[in-house]
Image (tube, rainbow, N blue to C red):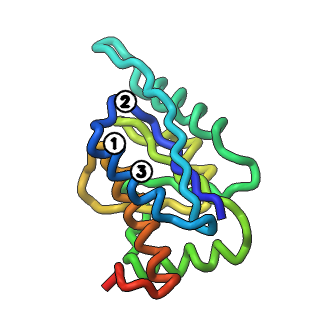
Amino acid sequence: MKIRLLTITHKTPAWVIAGYEDYAKRLPAQYALELVEIPAEKRSTRTDIQRIIEREGEKLLAACKPTHRIITLDVQGKPYTTEQLASLFIEWQQTGRGIDLLVGGPDGLSAACLNKSEMSWSLSPLTFPHFLVRLIVAEQIYRVYTIDTKHPYHR
């Protein structure tokens, strides 16, 4: 199963890149994780934030694979335990369909992205810097893989 993390990006710290890459390279082919970075729209004091959210959403949706399941990461989404997430990923793996995980910019995801998604996943009710989300997601996917393979990482 191909898992793609599509994210609106602006200035990612080196330690986040290193952490993400570490988890991504640990994953085998059946949990292959690909990062797709889409540059954030420029913002200023006169910016129409709603229009920026819409443009970023259009870019995210254009980057999605037509056969992939779209899952949005959104604070209003459903919170899953790691075990629940593992069950979902194991089930999805059996369908052979890829997954596109969408992470919006600093102002969130467009309504179009939320409407197009099959599921909305909340990492937490807390607000995280968007660059940090990629690291958390990569670690959770690695954890899902270790649960699936009964590796001792998850205990």
> Can you tell which quarter of the image residue 80 is in?
bottom left
Q: Residue at x 50, y 39 (%)?
A: 110
Q: CA distance from mark 3 to mark 1?
A: 13 Å
User: What residue would you read off at disc 2?
Assistant: 10
Q: Amino acid type of disc 1?
A: Phe
Location of residue 35 with respect to 53 vertically, above or below? below
Give the mark nearest the N terminus, 2 or 3: 2
In the rendered image, residue 141, in percent from the top left (x then y), is placed at 46, 66
Frontmost of labels 2 and 3 is 3
Q: CA distance from mark 1 to mark 2?
A: 8 Å
How many C-alpha atoms fall within 10 Å of the one at disc 2: few (<14), some, or many (≥20)? Answer: some
Q: Amino acid type of disc 3?
A: Glu
Q: CA distance from mark 2 to mark 3?
A: 17 Å
Q: Secondary structure at mark 2?
A: loop
Q: Residue at x 47, y 27 (%)?
A: 39
Instruction: Tell me the number on the disc at residue 131.
Output: 1
User: What residue would you read off at disc 3?
Assistant: 21
Marks 2 and 3: CB-CB under 8 Å? no
**Is 17 left or right of 100, judged from the image as shown?**
left
Location of residue 41 with respect to 126 vertically, above or below? above
- Judged from this view, the residue extending furthest toward the top is 46
What quarter of the picture does the C terminus occupy?
bottom left
